[in-house]
Amino acid sequence: MPATVRIPAPLTGTLLVVGGQCRKVGKSALVVDVIKAFPNRRWTAVKITPYVESGCPINGPSCTCRQGEHRFAIHEELSKDGASDSSRFLAAGAQRALWLQSKEGTLELSLESLKEKLADATHVIIESDALMKFWKPSLFLMVLDPANPDFKSSALENLPLADAFVFRSPFERLSPVTDTPLISQKPQFLQPLGTPLPSALKQFLAGSISAPTTISPLGT
């Protein structure tokens, strides 16, 4: 995987990234559960939407900007009403919550600004699959559902990068797509949607997010 981002001053802190095989597989729910499980980490939680559907990440669908304009926006979440994933992060106990939206193909351009937003953070959790092309986190969790046939090609590319897998349905129900040593050789935890964070997963995470590490780009 190419390293296309070079960050001149890597951040000091723990970076946990949560990705998944497809939409609606429960990535945001896992972020919420991790924040609740470790309330003293003073989390900065980030939601990344790399292909904003409205057309413009700054002004929304009414904007007439061209492709090279209004390429990304980073919104600071202030509400805990649960109306958005970032507000759910705040409601779960995150100290800060950010929502990064970018036009297609421009996520890389936003990462320097995101790094500046995270400069004072010691524990960062980011919901994103696309970020794995550019940053190497302290820990990368992938959410999989063997009962769901939808599996994005980008998610397949991320399988070798995962440190552990969280399953929304039993691992025994593997599909031909997910029946691979890339999964079976990594730690696996079963957590159906709506159930508490498994104690084994909490213990696994505790060993990785207790002490600050270095947030650095791939290839450095």
Image (spheres, rainbow, N blue to C red):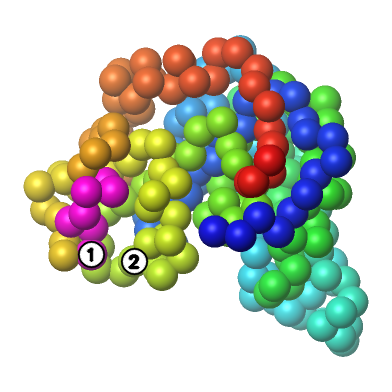
Quickly name the residue at label 1.
177
Q: Earlier in the sequence, mark 1 or mark 2?
A: 2
The quarter holding residue 107 reads bottom right
Q: Is residue 10 left or right of residue 65?
A: left
Callout 1: 10 Å neighbours few (<14), some, many (20+)? few
Q: Secondary structure at mark 2?
A: loop
Q: Nearer the viewer, residue 88 or 217?
A: 217
The amino acid type found where label 2 is placed reads Phe
From where the camera sits, is residue 192 visible? Answer: no
Please provide the residue range marked out in magenta. Answer: 177-183
Q: Secondary structure at mark 1?
A: loop
Quickly name the residue at label 2.
151
Q: Is residue 180 left or right of residue 14?
A: left
Residue 106 to residue 26: above or below: below
Q: Residue at x 47, y 49 (%)?
A: 19
- Horizontal and vertical percent position of residue 103: 73, 72
Q: Is residue 79 left or right of residue 211?
A: right
Residue at the far front: name it.
220
- Count of numbered circles on the image: 2
Which quadrant does the C terminus fall into?
top right
Q: Nearer the viewer, residue 83 or 128?
A: 128
- Label 2 near label 1: C-beta < 8 Å? yes
- Horizontal and vertical percent position of residue 198: 30, 25
Residue 210 to residue 50: above or below: above
